Amino acid sequence: MHELSIVANLFDIMEEQVREQKAKKITGVKLQVGRLSGVVPEFLETAFHMYKKGTIASEARLEIENINLTYRCCSCGKTMIKDDYILICDACGSTDLEMLAGTELLLERMEMEV
């Protein structure tokens, strides 16, 4: 479960922000997790709740936004959201697609009490 090491790195980033902002505690965290990020959102959530015990984020809410696979066809320019891994343009049948979203793992927002 590599999600635990991801959460450990996330907490390093959050603790640095807490020091810089002179905050008292972290109350909320929002992450963006792409379908092809290699992260299982349920495991990430479990790891977050295990890791936060006894930390400055012990009462923090975690929100995970799942990011769909979004592509642009390089042949016809159509942008599409795909639920499957069949990489063919819905409009023209081309296989020349550029991925626009779906691989990210981002700390989008962190709420703190100062």
Image: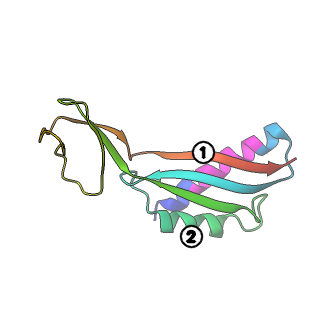
Q: Which residues are magenta?
A: 7-17
**Residue pushed farthest left?**
93
On screen, residue 60 above or below 81: below
Residue 10 lies within the magenta run: yes
In the image, 5: left or right of 56? left
Q: Nearer the viewer, residue 58 or 84?
A: 84
| Residue drawn at 55 percent across, 58 percent down | 64
Please provide percent x and percent y for residue 71: 30, 40
Residue 15 lies within the magenta run: yes
Q: Which residue is mark 2?
A: 46
Q: Which amino acid type is shown beneath numbered disc 1?
A: Glu
The span from disc 1 to disc 2 (Cα, nearest Å) is: 19 Å
Mark 2 residue crowding within 10 angstroms, few (<14) / some (14–19) / many (20+): few
Q: Which amino acid type is shown beneath numbered disc 2?
A: Thr
Labels 1 & 2 near each other (Cβ < 8 A): no
Instruction: Point out which mark residue 108 bears.
Output: 1
| Residue drawn at 34 percent across, 44 percent down | 70
| Residue drawn at 61 percent across, 55 percent down | 8
Q: Main secondary structure of the magenta part?
A: helix
Mark 1 residue crowding within 10 angstroms, few (<14) / some (14–19) / many (20+): few
Please provide percent x and percent y for residue 11: 66, 52
